[in-house]
Image: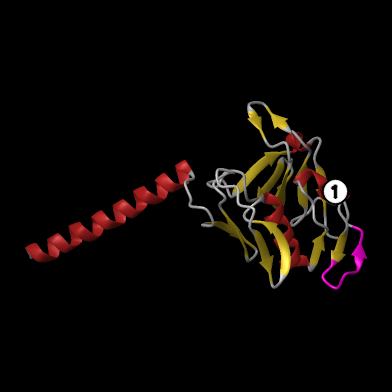
Amino acid sequence: MPLAKNNKIISNSIVILIFIFLIYKHVTGYYKFGEKIGTFKGVDAYSNQRGKTNSLDPNYYNGIYTGQKWQCVEFARRYLIMKEGITFSDVDSAFEIPKAQFKTLNGVLIKMSNDLKQGSLIVWPKGYEKGYEKISPDGHVAVVSFITPFGVTVVEQNYIDSWFHRFIKTSELKNTTIIGSPR
């Protein structure tokens, strides 16, 4: 009996330690560079340690350039490539996306909509600030994952790793640009 009791104590301790580790990781948002932080509709997002590791390394999906690892623009472009068969011309910063040319993977230029729907991009302008939170001089882009009458939930890279799904009130979407697929 004592051996079975010891095994139960050990296995319970392991479960508790794993649980504590997962809570710690969620609260602190500590992920290593390139570690997966979430998945939306089969598209993985990765940590760039919120800009602490600024890689200039390019990323490709099936030979198509998606952007610099693991920036917000890279996730948005890879999402559009994988889910819509659409890409956009190279941009230096997220705030430039609304002026980019969008095309199918076959090279046909297309006009995007400004419809807010699941899968749309939300683009924040250059130097956007919200209270104490300064987004970036480069703006920011995220993908809409869910819409409510009160706001939207987005998924993104290069924001806060522990908040892969982040809710944004409708009133906080002022000065953003919505870019939706024409499909």
Query: Which residue is depicted at the point 35% across and 48% down?
Result: 20
Q: Which residue range is magenta in the image?
A: 104-111
Query: Which residue is depicted at the point 92% across and 64% down?
Result: 109
Q: Position of residue 63 (x, y in %)?
A: 71, 72
Indicate left or right for 154 with 48 as reference: right
Q: Is residue 135 above or below residue 106?
A: above
Q: Is residue 68 visible?
A: yes
Residue extending farthest front: 56
Q: Amino acid at mark 1?
A: Pro
Indicate left or right for 161 with 60 as reference: left
Identify the image quadrant of residue 79.
Answer: bottom right
Total marks in image: 1
For residue 116: magenta?
no
Identify the image quadrant of residue 117.
Answer: bottom right
Q: Position of residue 26 (x, y in %)?
A: 46, 46
* Image quadrant containing the C terminus: bottom right
| SS for callout 1 | helix
Mark 1 surroundings within 10 Å by alpha-carbon count, few (fewer than 14), some (14 through 19), many (20 or more): some
Residue named by callout 1: 98
Overall secondary structure of the magenta stretch? loop
Q: Nearer the viewer, residue 81 or 163?
A: 81
Q: Position of residue 56 (x, y in %)?
A: 64, 53
Q: Is residue 182 visible?
A: no
